[in-house]
Image (spheres, coloured by chain):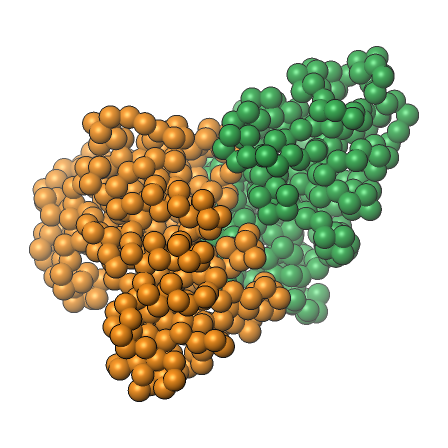
Chain colours: A orange, B green
Amino acid sequence: MKRVKICLAGPGNVGKHFVKLLIERNELFKKQYGIDLQLFAVAGSKGGVISSSPLDLEKVYHYSSQEPWKSYFPGYGIDDLKSWQIISDSETDLLVEATPSDLKTGEPGLTNFKAAIKAGINIVTLAKGALVTDFAGLMKNAAKQNLSIKFSGATAAALPTVDIAHYCLAGATIKKISGILNGTTNYILTKMAREGVDFNTALKEAQKMGVAEPKPDLDIEGWDTAAKIVIITNATFGSELSLKDISVAGIKEVTLERIEEASLKGKTIKLIGESGLENNRYKQTNQDIKNKVFVKPLALENHHTLARVDGTTKAIHFETDIFGDLTVVGGKSDPRAAAAAAIKDIINLARERF
Amino acid sequence: MKRVKICLAGPGNVGKHFVKLLIERNELFKKQYGIDLQLFAVAGSKGGVISSSPLDLEKVYHYSSQEPWKSYFPGYGIDDLKSWQIISDSETDLLVEATPSDLKTGEPGLTNFKAAIKAGINIVTLAKGALVTDFAGLMKNAAKQNLSIKFSGATAAALPTVDIAHYCLAGATIKKISGILNGTTNYILTKMAREGVDFNTALKEAQKMGVAEPKPDLDIEGWDTAAKIVIITNATFGSELSLKDISVAGIKEVTLERIEEASLKGKTIKLIGESGLENNRYKQTNQDIKNKVFVKPLALENHHTLARVDGTTKAIHFETDIFGDLTVVGGKSDPRAAAAAAIKDIINLARERF
């Protein structure tokens, strides 16, 4: 039995779903994979817990978003350490990074990542911030320490993206990747096209349905898609892009007229994140990158597999040499599925490393 | 640098493409994956070669289908050993099994598999025969010896199927798998639906295009699809099915009338291989299995992702709990892509084992 000692940073929404999945499935995972996932530490924004034995998961699930930690976890609750300090002191094998991350500064994920790497802890992340600000630096430092960083939860979660490139297409040269990587914007564009409503009406409906957030800017301005394509591109092509390196346009300017005009030409408008950085270890001018890695609304021919991907469904399309083209469609878009993506990464990391 | 010493059994069509890919890509693989793939032995139906140093790949590519082996490979060419004997004596790490295999007897693959396992050699197979006759026995014996068997090349090749279940959906419970797993039959059904031609006309056209073989029975009677779904099912659900355990119907009886009738109801007829064996280590009566694992033409609602998969394109659809539904579409259907699937398996096996 392989035992994985886990530290969870960010016991909020997705973090709680992660704990819930451990509660429900760990016995199954022991039988199915010979892997025992044990939670030894939790790092919140204002303290957390570090334990010398596996934490009571039910207790973590119920009390991890309450404070002060000392009163709920007497003896090992901590109220005066930052999350990176808890990670440093946790003596765990693996950090699950689920903090709400800022795409510009990368924080608090970036500091948490650095603390984990310094302490010899592998990382499975659901947060994008650290990876879109210093992907190359973090990967190099992790490699020096012989540590793995996996990030399915930060790259479309239940829809496999980097896994496909890394595992299912091993040996092929990938020429181009394009994806519908954000469910909210795809829902809005689908609604506009099908029901003939304008952007604002579709957005309001999406918010009412819980598909769009009250503050929807990260999604509708394309930044969520951009963060995902930057990470997927770096992981696949060995590039060293940050979020600021690529050109990003969202769907605010997509009018109903433009959608109808495209439709008359047998086309469908989708918000596409695309990367055509064919070569590994790609070094080019910024202008080359902006042309080859971008996020923008594109009018796709209706027979293109991505044109038919509707509603909140996501999809990714790979153009390769020896394997031909491959499209992957689906995967749930909810916090539980995001947590499941972290579980997947942990299982695969344990298979490879433990 | 990880070195993998390879024995190739079956240096025919796909086998030659495999050697060609090694010639073209091994330098790239060394850099990209830190893996050096070296061919040390070739086992043909009437002899082969065993070498104590890496074989000259160009020479193997050009002369491996000629005989006698001794005259083309003086000193180490062998004309009087069977393929399993060459495998046994090869002192290699990995067998690439690319012999034309019989789906009923499993031979010559079955004997080759057994020889490899006995000699402590991992297996990457492109042939289905051994796996549809004694999947469970082979897997158990390999596990006892701590050996891996990978079989992407036997389960839709460039379309990832078992990789998705094993790697991309790790941690999820897969509830149902259904696939369009054979390009020839999908081409014929698509042609009938689009052009309103009958089965025989569509088959003849497919043969003219090189999409169907002169003897097309394995494809059109559903046995190729059946072999793939049997292997995928065993690998995913831990079942121990052989080809004879499941019910199989092909497309010979699909009339143009039936296709048109389905079309009027908003449906499309596809040859589907399906498995609904939800539980791991599934033990049921034969009748249960026949109901839950089958190959037959099904009328799918047009909005089903598989209904839109046309021509020679293949696809597989997974229903899971925590990841939701996932569909993978594409992958080339030619001998070079099949050889590429073996390369992929070798790279992943080397990552895990070497």
Up-down relation of residue B175 to residue A309 (above or below): below
In the current view of this chain or complex, which residue is farthest to the top? B71
In the current view of this chain or complex, which residue is farthest to the right? B80
Image coordinates of residue B124 in percent, x first then y, are: 67, 41
Split into 4 quadrants, where in the image is the N terminus of chain B? top right
Up-down relation of residue A182 to residue A89 (above or below): above
In which image quadrant can residue A201 be found? Answer: bottom left
Up-down relation of residue B107 to residue A158 (above or below): above
Image coordinates of residue B104 in percent, x first then y, are: 77, 45
Split into 4 quadrants, where in the image is the C terminus of chain B? top right
Residue at point 70%, 15% (across, down): B59
Q: Nearer the viewer, residue B61 or A185?
A: B61
Q: Is residue B336 something one can see in this rendering?
A: yes
Image coordinates of residue A204 in percent, x first then y, are: 12, 61
Residue at point 80%, 33% (across, down): B90
Q: Nearer the viewer, residue A242 or B168?
A: A242
Total numbered badges shown on the rendered structure: 0
Residue at point 84%, 34% (across, down): B89
Judged left or right of residue B110, residue B299 is left
Q: Is residue B262 something one can see in this rendering?
A: no
Residue at point 71%, 65% (across, down): B286
Judged left or right of residue B108, residue A320 is left
Up-down relation of residue A227 to residue A56 (above or below): above
In which image quadrant can residue A6 be found? Answer: bottom left
Image coordinates of residue A330 in percent, x first then y, are: 38, 53
Q: Nearer the viewer, residue A106 or B260?
A: A106
